Amino acid sequence: MDKYEVRRQQMLILVEKYADGIQAKFAQLVDLHPATISHLLLPPDAPGKRPITERKVEHIENKLSLAPGWFDEPLQKDFVRWPFVSVEFNQFLKLADADKEELETLMRMKINRQQTKKK
């Protein structure tokens, strides 16, 4: 399977996960024309098939806050969606290490507090 087919399979997973399998809904979510999504998702030998280029990969990864390179990883049948709405994954990656540690500490404190309440 070449990299473009892996990317097509990954996008099919994203369309299912983020848009209930509806290509037009996914197109709106990632700010692309529905026909573009349709052409990208066509089977490899279909007329009108377009490859999912580096530019499209970067665009969709940014729109969905996916880790850079996500499309080219082994097929992601189950993946965890970035949980934050107002902070994109790429923004988080640009933080200084000390800031990332501070956020992790805060999250750990919140989780510990929640677990203590359950007991």
Image (tube, grey):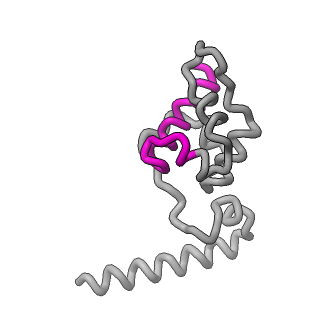
Q: Can the viewer see residue 66 in this picture?
A: no
- SS assignment for the magenta stretch, majority: helix
Residue 84: horizontal and vertical position, in percent? 55, 68
> Which one is nearer the viewer's eye here, 102 or 37?
37
Who's the residue at 74% across and 64% down the image? 94
Q: Is residue 65 a member of the stretch shown in magenta?
A: no
Question: Compared with residue 44, is residue 111 higher up or lower down, i.e. above or below?
Answer: below
Who's the residue at 67% across and 50% down the image? 31
Question: Compared with residue 80, is residue 14 higher up or lower down, i.e. above or below?
Answer: above
> Which one is nearer the viewer's eye here, 2 or 60?
60
> Which one is nearer the viewer's eye here, 29 or 110?
29
> Which one is nearer the viewer's eye here, 91 or 22?
22
**On-image quarter of the N terminus:** top right
Q: Can the viewer see residue 46 in this picture?
A: yes
Magenta residues, as a range? 1-26
Residue 35: horizontal and vertical position, in percent? 64, 34
Residue 39: horizontal and vertical position, in percent? 63, 28
**On-image quarter of the C terminus:** bottom left
Q: Is residue 22 a member of the stretch shown in magenta?
A: yes
Who's the residue at 31% across and 85% down the image? 116
Residue projecting furthest to the left:
119
Number of numbered discs on residues: 0
Question: Compared with residue 58, is residue 93 higher up or lower down, i.e. above or below?
Answer: below
Residue 104: horizontal and vertical position, in percent? 55, 73
Left or right of residue 102, residue 74 in this image: left
Residue 47: quarter of image:
top right
Question: Compared with residue 34, is residue 83 higher up or lower down, i.e. above or below?
Answer: below
Who's the residue at 62% across and 40% down the image? 34
